[in-house]
Amino acid sequence: MLHRFTSDISSIPVPEVFNNPFDYVPHELCKVAAAELQSYLGNHPELCREGKMFGVLVVRCADGSLGWLAGFSGNINHRNRYPFFVPPVFDLLDADGFFVKDEAELDAVNARIAAIERSEELAVARRNLAVARCHADSCLDDLKRRFAADKVRRDALRAQGVDADTERRLIAESQFQKAELKRVRQRLAAEVAVVQARVDEFDNEALRLKAYRKERSAEVQRHIFSSFVMLNARGERRSLLEIFSHTPQGIPPAGAGECAAPKMLQYAYLNGMLPLVMAEFWWGDSPASEVRHHAHFYPACVAKCKPILGFMLQGLDVEPERRCSDNHDIKVLYDDPWLLVVDKPAGMLSVPGRIDATSVWHKVQHSRSSNSPMAVHRLDMDTSGVLVFAKDINTYRVLQRMFARREVRKTYIAVLDGIVTADSGTIELPLHADPLHRPRQCVDFERGKPAVTDFRVIIRSDDTTTVEFIPHTGRTHQLRVHAAHRLGLNTPIVGDRLYGRRQSQRLYLHALRIELQHPVTGDLLSVESPLPWKSE
């Protein structure tokens, strides 16, 4: 299971701290290990029938030598164990394990539910019920029409004048018809109820089985998560149920504990190896909704792995998470009594967020104590460029309507990590938040919100393409996803740690220009920020 480096690594320094698995540039030792693993994968195509996340973990063995471990997320070809890779923390697919047996039981329940819902007896019963209801409605309608005609006749007679005996006869007739309508309604309802009872027999059995399935599924999930007992560098043990008990969701998501990173760390701890550095890469075709590029390194997933790795890495010296930069001066690009336009630096939040960090809003607020400018729109933390603030609530509301109506023209410049062959075009890919990899977005043609971007190539170099983006919508990470997704330009922005490769110190995406009609004067306002990387 432990692999020795076949390449010469004598000149590569050993890392002093473990990399942060959620934000890292792959260490050279990881690149070498990944290359050796990728060579193995290239010789074993049966392992790569679908896109998969693989990982490498460089370790120091008990004798002081270096080696590396390989892992994969989930399973491959419905198997959890392959000789070249570390084993799962808990093997769900063990033929003698409880999960396989419980899964077989749940499959049998599903089959019974499906058999009931597809049965010819239920179909016949539902057809009989429909016929019975139709017959009852028809009978009642006919009776009501006949009785209504009788009422019209009685009213006409009374209008002409009737004697006391005739009035008593008319009253008796009316009372009889009311009682008769009630009796017929009850009789027809009873007839329908008999047919309904037959349908209910099937439906109630299906509901009972579904309730049982739900209860048993929850039991199986609890059993699974309690069987995943994770280790950390201190030798402490904790089940997934315990690890996730303090998270907002309170329970582990499906698939927790089955990613490459927890598997490799668990194996290292169990075998007396010291983890030094780790990296994960995608191998194969990208999924339809996500942005994954073959052989690119990616951070660990947040929803499933962050709580787990937060525990498993305790006892190791780990790089801290990257913090927002707060030491930048904010350059003013335009200033009048109603508007303030500034040049946002990369690495700083536009407005206060979930993390405790200084934002551009803080800087603007601090420098202008007389009022409280309001951000009209936002830029990603990693994006630089033109950012607009309103100085009063009326201006803010007018600008908000202008942005909502797409009356503001925004121009971005980006450097893409590869060559884009098309000279220009329009990208239309609807976007939706990826619940397992926040803050990442995914392409979702069913639930996603419309996102439209025009692009134009400015210049191509040996291995990059500089493009102009004009977004017609303002979705989160819109330009980043439209650039990186295979149905977009299939070429991520340079330095994009979420959708591409974090091979540079910044994301090469810049809000170059904003053009709008001034909300007070009505003049055309065009404000531009110079490209920051030209001066780098």
Image: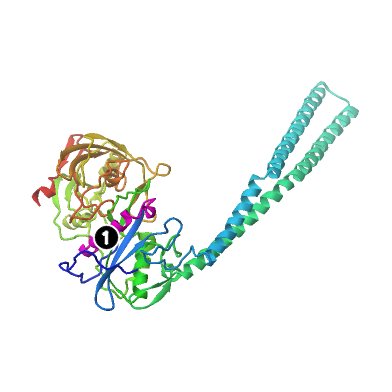
Give percent across and percent down for residue 307: 37, 66
Q: Which colour scheme is used?
A: rainbow
Please state which amino acid type lies under the numbered disc 1: Glu
Left or right side of 168 for 140: left
Q: Residue at position x 58%, y 58% from top? A: 106
Magenta stretch: includes residue 338: no
Left or right side of 113 for 63: left
Quadrant assignment, res 9: bottom left
Between 498 and 348, the one nearer to me in the picture: 498
Q: What stretch is highlighted in magenta?
A: 23-51
In this view, the residue farthest toward the top is: 160
Give percent across and percent down for residue 383: 21, 50
Which quarter shows the N terminus?
bottom left
Between 61 and 104, the one nearer to me in the picture: 61
Q: Tell me if residue 311 can be seen.
A: no
Could you tell me which secondary element the residue under label 1 belongs to?
A: helix
> Can you identify the residue that label 1 sits on?
36
Give percent across and percent down for residue 161: 83, 23
Q: Residue at position x 37%, y 75% from top? A: 270
In this view, the residue farthest toward the front is: 43
